[in-house]
Image: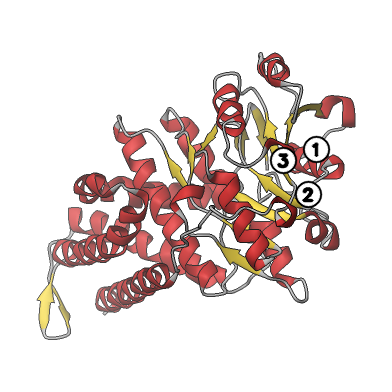
Amino acid sequence: MLMVMLFYLAVLLATGYVSLIVCYRFFWIGAKEIKTDFESDDETKLPFISIIVPARNEEANIGILLSSLQNQTYPQSLFEIIVVDDFSEDNTASIVKSFSGGNVHYVSLKDTIGNLALNSYKKKAIETGVSIAKGELIVTTDADCEAGNKWMQTIAHFYAKNKPDMIVMPVVMSKEKTFLQLFQQLDFMSLQGITGGVISQGLYQMCNGANLAYTKAVFNRVNGFKNIDNIASGDDMLLLQKVAKDKGHKIKYLKAQEVIIKTAPVENMDAFLQQRIRWAGKAGQYLDNRLFPVLFGVYAFNFILAFLFLLGCFNTVQYPLFWWSVSAWELLVGLILSKVIVELYFLISVAGFFGKRKLLWVFPLMQPFHIVYTLVAGWLGKFGKYKWKNRTVN
């Protein structure tokens, strides 16, 4: 009897998961792609933008980012780049200083806070940048990113036309040579599709700090990272949810090819798990309580898939399920097929926007790894610690 109930529970969770992914697909398709015309620029109507880049030990990447920012089609007189060095122990500072002059500014977090111990240095770095920023619009990105040359111009026009308090924008991973890089590409792309879909529907649950914009006024109005500065990460999603609670907020998703930011995937399995544990660790701090049942349901579905696998290894008995009798293995195969089909149904449209459809052939092969990593990262994100930028944090 217990096994029969378990099988029905598995089908119920699978039904909920499939329904959720179908909703995400329609949300994503419903997000209108923006086509911007730059032919009639009126610089008097465009905002001054402050780009804030927190950086720690990024000597391999920061030069690429700064070069891409200096190659923008947006007028140099209308933006500044503030790199806040988070106690780097490599040549990050000297590389940034080689770009200094004009609109690139180097700020040392060490000179600002001294030896003050924090759990979230990144939030303090962004907060420091905002405090000295001259722009009415703040744009954040990461030091290991690269922007297309129309990135800022597109953001500026969208802001000038819509005047949102916050703009959420797409990010894509740029390397796809190894299994781990391919997996990150597809997994991250699915998260980006969900992000665009839910934001466009007024569900302010997800965003990514590698490509995020908000007004300096709204940052100050919600008191920045106050009350969430004890959490190591969350400079993006937790801030988004604070802004969403602000009376009269206006949050938009900018679905445009020109604003896609490229970011580098992590290079090894340990770094990947540390990153995903960090992301999962924010779940208990979300201000939007509607997100928790979704995360719990997804985790429970993956858990029961793993359980059915283990059960099938030791138990070949068939149990009644609706009009049939099935074994644990047969049910597992059916559920995984349902999972793969609905996720591909969702990803086809998302991958088309990012120009990554050629990668989808490998997606079904990655299902076992996806299930295992979801369980491990989810558990450790709740109960463990992780390393971030050579620091162990909660």
Q: Mark 1 to mark 2: distance in Å?
A: 9 Å
Q: Is mark 2 on a helix, strand or loop?
A: loop
Relative to residue 304, is residue 176 depicted above or below? above
Q: Which residue is drawn at the image coordinates 44% and 51% (left, top)?
A: 257
Please give the label number shown on residue 229: 2
- Tell me: residue 310, above or below residue 25: above
Badge 3 is on which residue?
A: 79
Element type at marker 3? strand
Q: Can you identify the residue that label 1 sits on? A: 118
> Is residue 282 visible in the rendered structure shown here?
no
- Residue 248 at x, y percent in the picture: 75, 76
Circles 1 and 2, Cβ within 8 Å, touching? The answer is yes
Using residue 24 as the reference point, say whether residue 320 is left or right of it: left
Q: Position of residue 105 (x, y in %)?
A: 77, 28
Residue type pointed to by label 3: Phe
Q: In which quarter of the image is the C terminus?
A: top right
- Amino acid under disc 1: Leu
Front disc: 2 or 3: 3
Q: Write the residue at 69% across / 44% down.
A: 232
Which residue is rendered at x = 66% and y = 44% of the image?
Answer: 140
Left or right of 313: which side holds 286?
Answer: right
Number of numbered discs present? 3
> Looking at the rendering, which quadrant does residue 181 occupy?
top left
Could one spot residue 15 in this view of the protein?
yes
The x and y percentages for residue 366 are: 26, 46
